[in-house]
Image (spheres, rainbow, N blue to C red):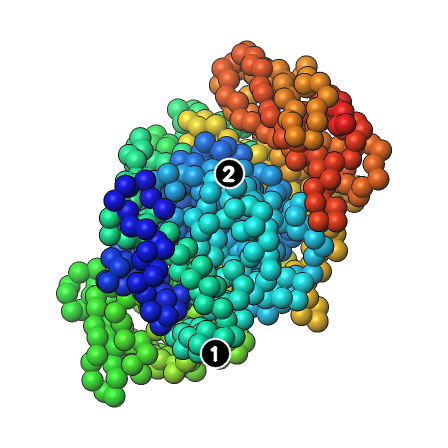
Amino acid sequence: MSTNPAAPDARELLDRLTLAEKVRLLTGRDFWSTWPLEKIGLRSILMSDGPSGVRGPVWDEREPSLNLPSATALSASWDDALAYRYGAVIAQEARRKGVDVVLGPTINLHRSPLGGRHFEAFSEDPLLTGRLAAAYVRGIQDNGVAATPKHYIANDFETDRFTASTEVSERTLREVYLLPFEKAVTEARAWAVMSAYNAVNGVTATENDLLQTPLNSEWGFDGVVISDWTAVRSVNAARAAQDLEMPGPRGVWGDALLAAVESGAVDEADIDRKVLRILTLAARVGALEGTRAVEPAATPGSGTAFAREAAAEGMVLVRNTGVLPLDPGAVTRIAVIGHNADRARTQGGGSATVVPEKVVSPLDGIIAAFPEAEVEYALGAVVQEGVAELPLEALTNPATGEPGAHVRFLGEGRELFTEDRRATRLVWFGGDAPVDRSDTLEITTRYTSPRTETLRLGVAAPGVSRIWADGELVLDADVPLANEQLGAAFLHPPTTSGAVPVAEGQAVEIRVEYEIPKDTGLAGALAYTLGTEAEDSDPDGLIERAAAAAARADVAVVVVGTNSSVESEGFDRTSLALPGRQDALVSAVARANRRTVVAVNSGSPVELPWREDVAAVLLTWFGGQEYGNALADVLTGAREPGGRLPTTWPARQSDVPVLDVTPVDGEVRYDEGVHVGYRAWLRSGTAPAYPFGYGLGYTTWTVDRATATPEFGSGGAVKVRAEVTNTGGRTGKHIVQVYASRAHTAVDRPARWLVGHEAVRLAPGATETVNVTVPARAFAHWDEGTWAYEPGEFTLHVGSSAEDLPASVPVRLR
């Protein structure tokens, strides 16, 4: 429980509790915390989203969070040491906000590129995901904060995620989907795991035997299984190894669980086991009297410096005809083009969203990196869908005179609560606002227009909204739900707007009234955005003006990407195409300037039909709040683009071998078995745009002279060695990858599968022998309830991607 010798004994504390007290501890006190119990010295344990930043107990721009690059950016680094540091920075953020348990990392797999939460998970490969997950968990927990790998298990889609069942074989579960969790538990000793919404083979995850076997019985998990929010469906979950129901206080367990124990329907021993685990977690994070959590270690540099480094480490250069890196001293005029260049996506949408203090856009970063160059910006194509919040610098709070807006909650005509906010994208998800007791939300602000235009002033929220501009009613709308779930609308609200003509410098008094729905689907939670919809009345003109800007420039940098309607929690994608007219934009710019560089600002694969027509392509993911500076670092060569692909990028959606994410008759069938990701691509024989593991740099490499240790038994490991040489003119980073294959086998195996990898950094002309340890389990397959080893010869392939493997060496399993 704790290294502190004064730590109390959990069993002794348990014996002091009544049955009612024990049951109470098993459901959250509120959205984010557990119940305290003074008589045993237990304080509340505070939890928080999310994997790429720590929001804390309130979703509020007045308490900003460090916004780190997305999980796909981290995984593209293929760097365990970076993942460990990432976890350590997360722990520092958690302690700064008083958080004990971070609800991450998300380690579901990229089974299909249409998965809506793809950006929040690491990769399509179980080994790469598992290694990075274990490092991330160690980084958090070595610094006194609990990590919560999620979502256990086979929750790799968003459509009907609350009700759908994943139909998957035991072998596939063991070899593919459970492996990342196994590594997070057995190698990093995760203190918590989050159970998923979906069912697995017909049994909902919070009641599934998989919570006991293999999690507890085989892996030795001694932490707390926390439910995804509202994932506990019945008292039956208490009979399983589900430990804590979140959120509270109005959960499914409570009085019903107490009655079930008193009647004998649930064994009190099951309750005791859960309480002991919660007390163990409390001791680990310092929430029990007599215990003290490890203080987070100081890390070199600031959190923003790490965010900048991590973003660059994950950027993947997939094409370069020699235009990159750019010499700032030699460039006199740059065209920066694209909606995402000015309004970049730094994170995906959903519950894990954090609010950073400041975001550096690509435009900002390029202007700073090229101080002597003339930088011309052109929008090019509208990407935004729905309402974007009003910029803070254009707002004045009428109550304070400071930047922002004044907010009031009203009930029966009287003021119940008021606050001054520094944003018009407002979320109440925890905190003191009386959402459940109010019938009206009022927002007032003064907007000063930076230009003469017709402002498409609107809202994002279901239900009745009214907007007055200078006393004139400009919007009176009852916005219908896209579906019947108000809870879903919390993350993906419907929008509407009205036209307000404004002149440059004109100040407009804005007042909004919103009739708060009686049931938001999440008790005490509310989301509301006052903002503007993008003007897109002249799409051809936007492209023409962008192409003209490119023609005047030495180099054109186009930033394309997705929007919140494409990649977010709560829904899956329907298309891999870039939204809007971005493909036409890139083609037009490339025709105007042969030195066109494209940065792709998406969290997951998109089609790039123009990829061979431009001078360079950088896959930059959701790069966190320092995205613009990191991109500029890579463009100028101040940093190496250190990434390699953690998932396969298709040329066309129709080529993708495993695509389905939509349940049929309530089921998503994983009939492809172990052939997921690049394994499926190898089996299909179709060439992707860019294969798994692929990535260029600003130097070149050779990998050869691979050797391996002699024959080994099932309990040993293979030591693979290969000589790696930096054959270029710059110091750089390379990822040495090792894959296994089996030519003659009685087992349905992938054509190749990743069994090891290591990062190496070398000066120009330097050679290093890189050692990669391949554990025996890499050669095992699951067969009738156990790990089995097929004797005979395997081949280990060493190289730079799933398709570039110049060196190979046989090994024999006996």
**Residue lying at 29% horizontally and 53% vertically, measured from the top left:** 287
Say which residue appears at 59% left-offset and 70% top-offset: 163
Residue 372 x %, y %: 34, 30
Secondary structure at numbered mark 1: helix
Residue at image point 68% right, 18% down: 709
Q: CA distance from mark 1 to mark 2?
A: 40 Å
Q: Position of residue 589 (x, y in %)?
A: 56, 43
Q: Position of residue 446 (x, y in %)?
A: 23, 67
Q: Which residue is the site of mark 2?
A: 187
Q: Find residue 391 and report its horizontal and vertical position in percent.
A: 31, 58
Q: Which residue in the structure is indicated by mark 1? A: 263
User: Marks 2 and 1: in contact by CB < 8 Å?
Assistant: no
Front-most of residues 487 and 544: 487
Q: Is residue 779 left or right of residue 562?
A: right
Asked if residue 702 is positioned above or below residue 164 in the image, the reply reads above
Name the amino acid type tagged 2.
Glu
Disc 1 residue type (three-letter): Ser
For residue 809, what is the image quadrant?
top right
* Local crowd size for mark 1, using a 10 Å CA cut-off: few (<14), some (14–19), many (≥20): few
